[in-house]
Amino acid sequence: MTRIDRHLVAATGVLVLAGLAAALTAPPDRLQGDLQRLMYVHVPAAWLAYLSFGLTLAGSVGWLRRRQDRWDRLAASAAEVGVFFTGLAIVLGAIWGKPVWGVWWTWDPRLVTTAVLFFAYLGYLALRRATVDAVQRARRSAIFGVVAFVQVPVVHFSVLWWRSLHQPPTVLRPGDPTIDHVMLAALLVNVVAFTAVSVVALRLRMRLANEEAELAAATTAPGRPLAGSAVTAPAVNYHPEGRR
C-alpha cells in the first residue's frame, strides 16, 4: 500500500467515525423515531450506486473512443462497487419498509426500478465473466455499460413519474430541502464518508484488475514454457526376451 493509500484510508476512517457520530447524535424523526437513522446509510448507498454506474458509463465511453484497457478496468471495477451499494440500499430499504409499510417488499415503482438496475449490472458482470476474449469482452461490456445507465435516471425520477409509496425527493429538489437542517448536515457528513469508502474500494479493485491483467499477460507471453514441459518420462530398460 502506497503512502497516498495509507493517508486515504486514514482519512476515510476519520470520516466514517464522524458520520457515525453525526447519525447517532442527530434528532430522531418525529414519526419514525430511531428507525429513521437507517437513512444515513441508505441514502449514501443509493447515491454511490448512481456515482459508480456513472463511472461505468464513463469507462465504457472511454474504451469505445480510445480502446485502452484502463478504461475497461475502470468500468468493470466501478460496476462491482455499484452493485454492492445497490444491494445495500435494497436491503436497508426492506428493513425500513417492514415496520413502516408492513411488508419487506412491495411492487412500488422505486423498488422495482432499483431491482431492475441491480440485476442489469449483475448481468453486466456476468457478461464479462462469460466472454473469454479480452477485446470482445471489453467491446460487449462497453456497449452494455452505456445502455444499462439509462436505468439510473429512471430509478431517480420514478417517484415523480409514477404514483409511489416511496417519499419524493427531499434534498435534490428545487428550493429549500424539506428535511430538518440538523438531520441534513448529518446526512451530508455520511454521504462524504461513504463516498470516501467507495473511492478506497474502487482504487483497490482497479489495482487488483491491473495485477490480474499483468498476470494474464505473463501467462500468455510467447515463448513461455508450458506447465510440465520440464518433466521427462522415466527411462525404461526393455528386454524383449524377458529376464532369464
Image (cartoon, helix red, strand yellow):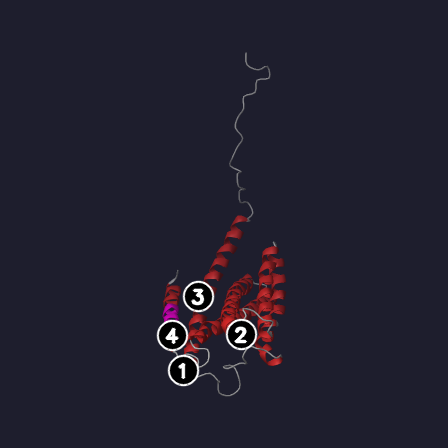
Quadrant assignment for the C terminus: top right
Which mark is first along the chain, 4 or 3? 4
Above-or-below relation of 181 to 97: below
Q: Give the amino acid at mark 4.
A: Leu
Q: Which of marks 3 and 1 is in front?
A: 1
Say which residue label 2 marks: 101
**Label 2 element class:** helix
Which of the numbered marks, if any, corresponds to residue 200? Answer: 3
Prevailing secondary structure class for the magenta stretch in the rendered image: helix
Which mark is first along the chain, 3 or 2? 2
Residue at (48, 72) in percent of width and height:
42
Q: How far apart are marks 3 and 4 (CA)?
A: 24 Å
Q: Answer left or right for 181 relative to 234.
A: left
Which mark is first along the chain, 4 or 1? 4
Q: How far apart are marks 4 and 2 (CA)?
A: 24 Å
Q: Give the amino acid at mark 1.
A: Val
Q: Distance between the residues labelled 3 and 1?
A: 28 Å
Magenta-span inclusion, residue 20: yes
User: Along the line of sight, which residue is nearer the eye, 156 or 53?
Assistant: 156
Give the quarter of the image for residue 189.
Answer: bottom left
Which mark is first along the chain, 1 or 3? 1
Q: Nearer the viewer, mark 2 or mark 3?
A: 2
> What's the magenta region?
11-24
Say which residue label 1 marks: 182
Q: Distance between the residues labelled 2 and 3?
A: 35 Å
Which of the numbered marks, if any, corresponds to residue 120? Answer: none
Give percent across and percent down for residue 215. Answer: 50, 52
**Label 4 element class:** helix
Give percent across and percent down for residue 160. Answer: 59, 81
Which mark is first along the chain, 2 or 4? 4
Say which residue label 4 marks: 24
